[in-house]
Each structure stands twice: as structure tokens, then as C-alpha cells.
Image (cartoon, rainbow, N blue to C red):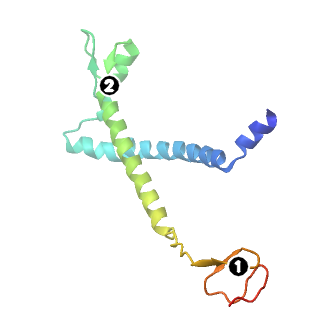
């Protein structure tokens, strides 16, 4: 069982996936900061000073001035501003991943077309050899 587990963990795909998850998590933190700290403040300012992270609906009769106050009081809330931030973060991450994949694919060489060489059978050793061959590469018999 240990050998099977070791073979599974050391396969290239598992290691690549582990690295991708770690890099993806770090990338997500950077993009979240980009959205929350750089993009959303100007967007909120353009929309009349709205702070998206502070947009919420209280599900009780009480009213609160900020989401932090409502959460401190333990009031049930629908945090649609945070949802908007997360949707924008997702769109930016998806766009960044798309651009990275697109650029990597443009750097890769297209697969070369496989050219099939017409073959014939050697009368001596019955190996497949090119049609234009004058000598068999396997048994070296001279062909007519």
C-alpha cells in the first residue's frame, strides 16, 4: 500500500496539481487585494462614494450604520456588497488565467503533421520498408 501511495504522490500530474493549487491560492490573494484595495475604491467614488464592502441588508427590525456593527450585534445580514466584490474578483482572476493560458499556447509550437510514407513488405524478412527503398534496413537484402 505504501508503494502505491508513493507512486501516486510522486507522479508528475499530482505534483503539478499541488503546485498549481498553491500558486492559484497566492494569486487569488493578490487579485483580491487588487480588487478590494485598488479597483473598488475608485469605482465606489464614481458611483457616489459607495463602499461595496459595506452594502448589506439587515434581516431584522434593527438598523445598523455599517456591516461591522451589524456583525458585532450578531444580526443576520445579506452581504450583497461583499458578493459584488467577489464577483469582480472572480472575473479578474478568470481574465488573468485566460490571458496566461492564451499567451502560453501562442508560445507552443503547433504539432507537426505526420507524413505517412508508403511502404511495402520485404520479401525476405517480411518487415515493412519504404516503397522507394532499394535495400531492406532490417535484413539488408537487395530489392528489385
x and y percent of residue 87 in the render?
Answer: 34, 38
Quarter the C terminus occupies = bottom right
**Farthest residue in the left direction?**
48
Residue at left offset 19%, top offset 39%: 48
Disc number for residue 79:
2
Residue at left offset 45%, top offset 63%: 103
Observer-nearest residue: 54 or 25? 25
Observer-nearest residue: 45 or 106? 106
**Farthest residue in the top direction?**
61
Question: Vertical placement of 54 versus 46: above or below?
Answer: above
Q: Is residue 119 left or right of residue 40?
A: right
x and y percent of residue 106 in the render?
Answer: 45, 67
Residue at left offset 27%, top offset 13%: 59
Callout 2 crowding tier (Cα within 10 Å): few <14, some 14–19, many ≥20: some
Q: How many marks?
A: 2
Disc number for residue 122:
1
Question: Vertical placement of 7 versus 105: above or below?
Answer: above
Callout 1 crowding tier (Cα within 10 Å): few <14, some 14–19, many ≥20: many
Residue 122 placement: quadrant: bottom right
Question: Vertical placement of 71 versus 61: above or below?
Answer: below
Amino acid at each position: 500500500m505504501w508503494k502505491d501511495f508513493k507512486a501516486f504522490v510522486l507522479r508528475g500530474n499530482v505534483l503539478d496539481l499541488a503546485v498549481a493549487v498553491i500558486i492559484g491560492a497566492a494569486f487569488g490573494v493578490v487579485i483580491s487585494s487588487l480588487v478590494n484595495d485598488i479597483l473598488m475604491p475608485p469605482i465606489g467614488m464614481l458611483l457616489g462614494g459607495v463602499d461595496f464592502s459595506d452594502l448589506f441588508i439587515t434581516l431584522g427590525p434593527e438598523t445598523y450604520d455599517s456591516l461591522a456593527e451589524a456583525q458585532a450585534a450578531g444580526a443576520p445580514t445579506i452581504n450583497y456588497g461583499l458578493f459584488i466584490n467577489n464577483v469582480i474578483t472572480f472575473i479578474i482572476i478568470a481574465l488573468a488565467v485566460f490571458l496566461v493560458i492564451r499567451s502560453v499556447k501562442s508560445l507552443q509550437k503547433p504539432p507537426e503533421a505526420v507524413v505517412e510514407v508508403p511502404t511495402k513488405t520485404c520479401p525476405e524478412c517480411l518487415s515493412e520498408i519504404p516503397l522507394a527503398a532499394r535495400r531492406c534496413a532490417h535484413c539488408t537484402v537487395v530489392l528489385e
